[in-house]
Amino acid sequence: MTIAPERVEETVAPRPSTSGRARFVLILGGLSAFGPLSIDMYLPALPQMAGELRAADATVQLTLSAFIIGLAIGQLILGPLSDAIGRRKPLVAGLALYMVGSILCAVAPTAELLIAARGVQAFGAAAGIVIARATVRDLYSGTAMTKFFSLLMLVNGLAPILAPIVGGQILNWTSWRGVFVCLTVFGAILLAVVFFLLPEPLPEERRTPARFGSVLRKYASLLRDRSFLGYALASGLMFGSLFAYISGSSFALQGVYGLSPQAYSLVFGLNGIGIVAVGQLNGRIVGRFPERTLLTVGLVIAAVAGFGVLAATVLDLGLIGLLIPLFVLVSSIGMVAPNASSLALAEQARSAGSASALLGVLQFVVGGLATPLVGLGGPGTAVPMGIVMAAFGVLALLAFGTMTRSTAPEPLALQQA
């Protein structure tokens, strides 16, 4: 079964029916939530894992870096592959590999083996992330695509809300290994849903060969495209700031500010609510305001909030003084991510998988670079987290402002989508 392809020359892409749209939101949202779930659900257990595995905090944090790097490599391979053979086959294989990696994480006896298992898990998770984003581009264009990306934030935002809360509750009756058992079950459910309910969104006539040379040339062409690269870097650097928060907040809020795992989970969930709320606001107002304008607003807010986080950690403004700018910065992702993704993919209809892969790689490579920087100051300070979050927020704004170009107003048909 194949969904009717988007005709690039048309101003409005054909799209699924209302019931089909709801199904796609849930399925694609679940697939793109792989990353947040696999990262956030075990965050409350990081201190416990360090103790049980007799490893330093910095070593345990490498499980985050390994996952992020695995996501990057997986997307680079699976994105072009999905352009060549369709979306379903790589997706099904990736979900199966994710389950294998999750099982290996659950039984890992040492921190080093856990780090390796996280790499396997991440490679499988990459299929869900890159193919979900490419599928949106297969089905939508223009403002309609931005609205759908914003709608996905409703599902994606639930991941950081529910994952650490569920992870914290799991720790009440089992060890951190139970978290990975739950992730295995989640992967199995999504595998069944994809196999039985997700039709192939990319028909054969729109597929492109995945020869090694042509793939390299396509990536080189994307990297030479200043506009694409500017949007991708803006998104990636913002994710760097977000990953600094993800990797550092567990140790900072529990170790420095004394929150329990359950209280930390609630704080993390509240920030997830911010992502959802801002994402839905973005979906309502896009079309009234251009995506570029909304992206500018989101990046400026994030940069200012980043300085607020830095000030709170350096000047010791207390827990409330830190939580307020943290909330603002994390919430701004709900405006930055859908607009940056839509603008970056707007001109990539025939190579959505490759463009989606490079977009995701920049996000997670930058995130992987940011993660170990947070632990450089040791467990007794939150200042490194503040420095990294502020720096990456400013760099995201600079990349957007210096590399992207303003485009002509969108057609009226897209404005009304």
Image: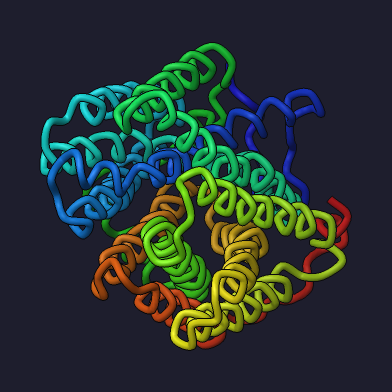
For the point 40% across and 32% down, the residue is 171
For the point 26% across and 56% down, the residue is 216
Q: Is residue 405 above or below residue 416?
A: below
Can you give x and y, in whole percent of width and height, for residue 91 in the image? 41, 28
- Residue 364, quarter of the rendered image: bottom left
Q: Is residue 132 left or right of residue 331?
A: left
Q: Looking at the image, which is closer to me, 82 or 151?
A: 151
Can you give x and y, in whole percent of width and height, for residue 105 in the image? 24, 31
Quadrant of the image containing the N terminus: top right
State the colouring used for the structure image: rainbow
For the point 41% across and 45% down, the residue is 44
Q: Looking at the image, which is closer to me, 414 or 32?
A: 32
Q: Note whether residue 150 is visible.
A: yes
Q: Note whether residue 32 is visible.
A: no
Q: Is residue 55 above or below residue 28?
A: below
Can you give x and y, in whole percent of width and height, for residue 220 in the image? 31, 65
